[in-house]
Image (tube, rainbow, N blue to C red):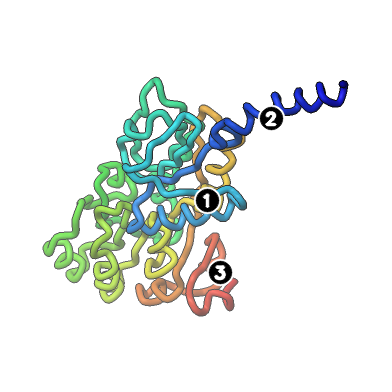
Amino acid sequence: MTCVLLTLALLLTVAPVQGQDPARGGPGRLFVRLLERVPTERALAAGIRACLRERRLLEHTPRVTLTPRDTVIVLHGTDVSGLSPARLIMAAQGVSSPGPRATVLGHVSLAVPPSRVRRVIRRVLPGTRRVLALGRSASWASIAEDVTVTAECLPLHRAAVIRGVYDALFIHDDHDALSSVEALIQLCAENRVPTVTTAPWLARSSSAIGVIPDLDVAALRIVGLLARPRLASTQVPSLTTIHLEAWRKAGLPSSAGRLAWAHRVHGADAGALR
């Protein structure tokens, strides 16, 4: 009789569990919102996937129906109202307020402050006064004494580069202004005008000097917010990088002592100098 009662109790216990929706238990889905054509966002998403290990990171699309158990890592876009009722981790530059009803696990800032760019320019390019800055924010006017800030590089700017009007070119990591920057960097290199950028992909490829957010640290901090949310914004530290080949094309000294202060040196001969 006891065995019969025990069996019946087990059946009554298991039956409701078997009938539940499997999606109700355990952590919800994890999404990332990004633009595939933006190199920085793509690289950061890859770093997040590597830190997650076994948990799957899905790409969010407007067709996805979110639930309160889902989490979206926002790497792109200013409007997050369409992500309700999911929980949010904000790492995009310029994201608007998600509203009082949104659950925000934390905010990781990838922004490089103009003051940091100014310090690097003063250290590695002493005497630089006139800078052509490609970006949409007027705050970049503070990176040097005489700065021309433009959302797009016009023919008159290119002509000024050739005439030697500018001491350096600055390019902000803004996907709307990156369509023809490689040709502009090449033009500046041909006229011995060094380039400074906050775009990690340019710093690794063709830019002489990078003042960029540390994407490895950013990925770790974003993943860390899944386990330990925090209200305060987390600022990602910046790295100073040098691309050796572009450095030489711009006519800058390439001695080991001059490059020793950089966090990272890229280029075919970088290993010989570090």
Check the picture and name the quadrant holding the N terminus.
top right
On screen, 268 above or below 70?
below
Check the picture and name the quadrant holding the C terminus.
bottom right
Q: Which mark is residue 35?
A: none
The answer to whether residue 140 is left or right of residue 253 is left
Q: Which mark is residue 257?
A: 3
Secondary structure category for the residue under label 2 = helix
- Of 58 and 18, nearer the camera is 18
Q: Return the x and y of residue 255 as percentages of the image width and height.
A: 52, 74
Mark 2 = which residue? 14
- Of 172 and 253, nearer the camera is 172
Q: Which one is earlier in the sequence, the residue at label 1 or at label 2?
A: 2
Residue ID at (43%, 38%): 90
On the question of residue 115 being in view, the answer is: no
In the image, what residue type sits under mark 1? Ile
Residue ID at (47%, 51%): 213
In the image, what residue type sits under mark 2? Val
Tell me how far mark 1 sits from mark 3, CA to CA: 35 Å
Residue ID at (75%, 27%): 10
Mark 1 = which residue? 48
Q: Return the x and y of residue 28 as percentages of the image width and height.
A: 53, 37
Q: Which one is earlier in the sequence, the residue at label 3 or at label 2?
A: 2
Residue ID at (38%, 30%): 84
Q: Residue furthest front?
A: 1
Secondary structure category for the residue under label 3 = helix
Mark 2: give few (<14), some (14-19) or many (20+) Cα within 10 Å. few
In the image, what residue type sits under mark 3? Gly
Tell me how far mark 3 sits from mark 2, CA to CA: 71 Å
